[in-house]
Image (cartoon, rainbow, N blue to C red):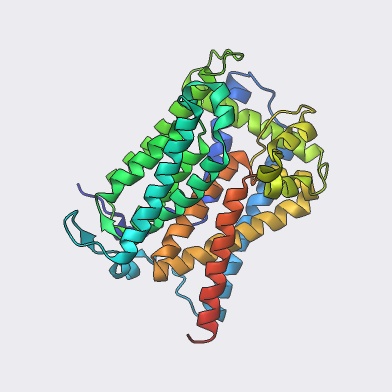
Amino acid sequence: MNFKLIDKKLDLFHPLIIVVMVILFLIIAMPMWYIYRQLPYPNIDLYLYIGIGLLSFILGIFLTNYFLKNKFKIFTSENPRTKSFNLNPQKLSIFDSYSKNELIIVSFVSIGILLQVINIALLGSIPLFSATLKAKAATKIWLISYIIFLPSINILLAKYNRKSHYLLLIIGLALFALTGYRTTPIGIMLSSLITLYYSRDVDLKYIILAILAIVIVLLAVGFIAVQAISWQHWSLNPIELLSYRAAFTLNVLSKAITNQCATMGKLLYTTLTGFFTHSDARVLVGQATLGRAHSITSTIFGPALLDFGILGMIVQMFLIALILKTLHTIQNNKKSIFTAFYSILLGQTIIWIETGPSDVVVYLFYLIGILLIIKTLWRLDNGV
């Protein structure tokens, strides 16, 4: 039987998927707490604070939906895909002519790929198999490459339905996976999947296969990178390692809950300036929670708690919901670049569930998303 999501009253990548993914993250962590008992299980405060954060996020979704519907009369149906498939890009073959805009976007994608090739070449070997090289791989060239490649490939996929563009996606994905960092290849795969979901008539079986591929890449890159660390010796298999990382990260969140306001805004400042001052916000997380100068993640809730306490966490989750839901609604009606940036922001926010908002490049993408929202709402308000 051929299942097509266009026929289903389900929007798989609605912003509320963040709630589902947070719950899934908790479930993944539980074996290490309650079955293998390799890490101490958390107290009730952890679940309470996560619940408060998710409630703030859900409230932000519904208030934004109400505001858009009543103030701007934007179509906010929970199943708008059936309405807007006529906005999807026309299928093109490799032999069909290329427009000027398409060639420009392909050029940007190619520049992103070329910069990553140069970055790996300058390192002299593949960082995925060397912890020492991995530590050196996050260069300015790597950052510029990602800033160029991620938006460009998603805009290309959102605007032009040409199968040959998938080759560029695969090449870029492979190159970023070779750096040994999980977040960049997962960000590319997640955002591309979401972009294709909203800009194509996608069969359910392909969605499932893509999700499985993301899981495999997550497990493989994480496991290989850990095995490459010569001074660490792990006896866990890839699935157990995934559970361990989730449980450890949530335990760090527990420490953040008991050490609220410990950093007093320094985490946010370091996130925004750290790449240029050679400082790491996650090292501050390690110092504030475990008393060690190690790069440590604390979930999407941790940095806000350490900087501004529970009120900061509530405001952060509400604002993330507001931005995601507004852009989600706009892209459902306009597609194109709006779909690309919604996909990027949602994909990166899913990654934040583990890593936390501590990447300046994601803040840059959020800023672009906010500017797109402001421009669109201004045009609607002025009847342009």
In this orientation, which residue lies closer to the viewer: 242 or 102? 102
Q: Is residue 208 left or right of residue 282?
A: left
Residue at the image position 68 percent from the left and 27 percent from the top: 41
Q: Is residue 131 above or below residue 66?
A: above
| Residue positioned 55% across, 79% down in the render | 378
Count up the numbered dots: 0
> Relative to 354, does residue 36 appear above or below in the rendering?
above
Residue sitting at the far bottom: 383
Q: Position of residue 312 (x, y in %)?
A: 75, 53
Q: Is residue 179 visible?
A: no
Position of residue 232 measured from the top left corner of the image (x, y, whole percent): 60, 15
Residue 1 picture location, percent across and down: 19, 47
Image point 52% across, 40% down: which residue?
A: 142
For the point 71% across and 55% down, which residue is it?
314
| Residue placed most toward the observer, 53 or 153 | 153
Q: Is residue 190 visible?
A: yes
Q: Position of residue 328 (x, y in %)?
A: 48, 63
Front one among 173 and 306: 173
Judge left or right: residue 118 versus residue 2: right
